[in-house]
Image (cartoon, rainbow, N blue to C red):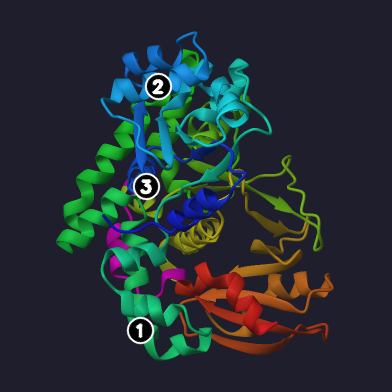
Amino acid sequence: MFKRKILSKLEAWKRDERHKPLILRGARQVGKTTVVNEFGSQFDNYLYFNLEMNESVRLFEMDIPLNDLVNMLFASSGKSQREGSTLIFIDEIQNSPKTIALLRYFYEQRPDLYVIAAGSLLENLVDVNVSFPVGRVMYMALRPCSFYEFLGAIGKTNLLAVLSQKPEYTVVFHEQLMHHFNQYTIIGGMPEAVQRYAETQDIVAIEDVYETLVQAYKDDSEKYVRGNKLTEVVRFILSYGWGFSGETITLGNFANSGYKSREVGEAFRLLEKAMILELVYPVSSTQMPIIPETKRMPKLIWFDTGLVNYQAGIRKEIIGSTDMVDSWRGHLAEQITAQELLSIEDRVGQHRSFWARPNNGAEVDFIFTHNSRLYPIEVKSGTNARLRSLHVFMDNSNIDTAIRVWSNPYSVDKVMTPNGKEYRLINLPFYLIGNLHQVLDEVL
């Protein structure tokens, strides 16, 4: 199995003397269990429990002192406790609200132990009044593989070394990097799909992986929701919503479904909690703080571009495309850009926004925050004269730097708006999105 970058974050958590129990969040099948099992090899003692197993639930829900429970955990695993560090991994913890509440006591009474809990439906428990140990746990998000992780998986360590250098050094390797980024855009970041492709180099051979994943999400809909009507709406979105990726949507009668705005909105919110999709809302301000305007129409962004391509039936169009920005009406380019921007962060609840001026038609694809400053991002090819919305944004802000994501090599231009404002435009190839913080540090 290939290495995930979150391992370095987990190692930093291990080194922290004041570590709290860690709740690892992420959609099903993004690799949470695999990552923690690999991380467990760094401990003298590693105990794994899956609370989908009734015997494990009964074990954690025993009414005994915590120290006695820890002894029982070792005994039930058939392991003797060795001197040194101990990691306890509680998988699918959402199946036992009592175990969730128990995390606070691990923090208060046994700070010598390292505890990780995972579960793809955890946040839905908030709706049923489960008591989370606020302030006594920390959260970390695991998302589908980034482009950099994809390169590592397919053995392109030489290109990873190039990407770690100054951005201008990538120009010589541009065609190679774009070739592999296009592969990544087709395949997506689901670990099983990436691993299968790394082994076979066959894009067609991974179609059954996507089919199995989508069916599993549909089967999970009963776990996401309570009530037959809402289950029906969730299943509809999981069947037909992929084709609206990157589009601004209306909730009422979404995809000609006939469902009401309230029903669709609730279904989308539940799928957001499961980290399967995100509704990206517009902002109209050009300065901090960024406050999403949730009364306006959002853009729909799914969590993985490979699943979008498969479910929307657009894989052949991408394979034959010469410029990703022109593929699938440009929505695919926005989808993959959004996915890469989100992969930069490991915080739970991290959201993206786009800028749209009310009653004007000007719209900038994304807003990015770096060192407490805003930077507009346009996903667009072509000449600087075509950046009409970006010019409007810059004219109405005190910002002097903007970003264009495109399929051409890296460069930095001086650009002037029709109103005479000069600003710096970073032309960022898709494969450098994951390095955006470092690029901005280099340029500014």
Number of residues whose C-alpha sits closer than 10 Å to that of mark 3, classed few (under 14), some (14–19) or many (20 or more):
some
Residue type at tag 2: Asn
**Residue labelled with disc 3:** 35
| Image point (39%, 37%), residue name | 28
Q: State whether residue 333 is above or below residue 342.
A: below
Label placed on residue 71: 2
> Of 260 and 187, which appears nearest the observer?
187
Q: Is residue 317 left or right of residue 114?
A: left
> What label sits on residue 175 in the rendered view?
1
Q: What is the x, y in percent for residue 266?
A: 59, 27
SS for callout 1:
helix
| Three-letter residue code for mark 1 | Glu
Spatial distance from mark 2 to mark 3, Cα to Cα? Answer: 25 Å
- Within the magenta stretch, is there residue 323? yes
From this view, report whether residue 308 is shown above or below residue 287: above
Q: Are marks 1 and 2 in contact (CB under 8 Å)?
A: no
Dot 1 or dot 3, earlier in sequence: 3
Magenta highlight: main SS: helix
53 left or right of 288 in image: left
**In the image, what residue type sits under mark 3?**
Val
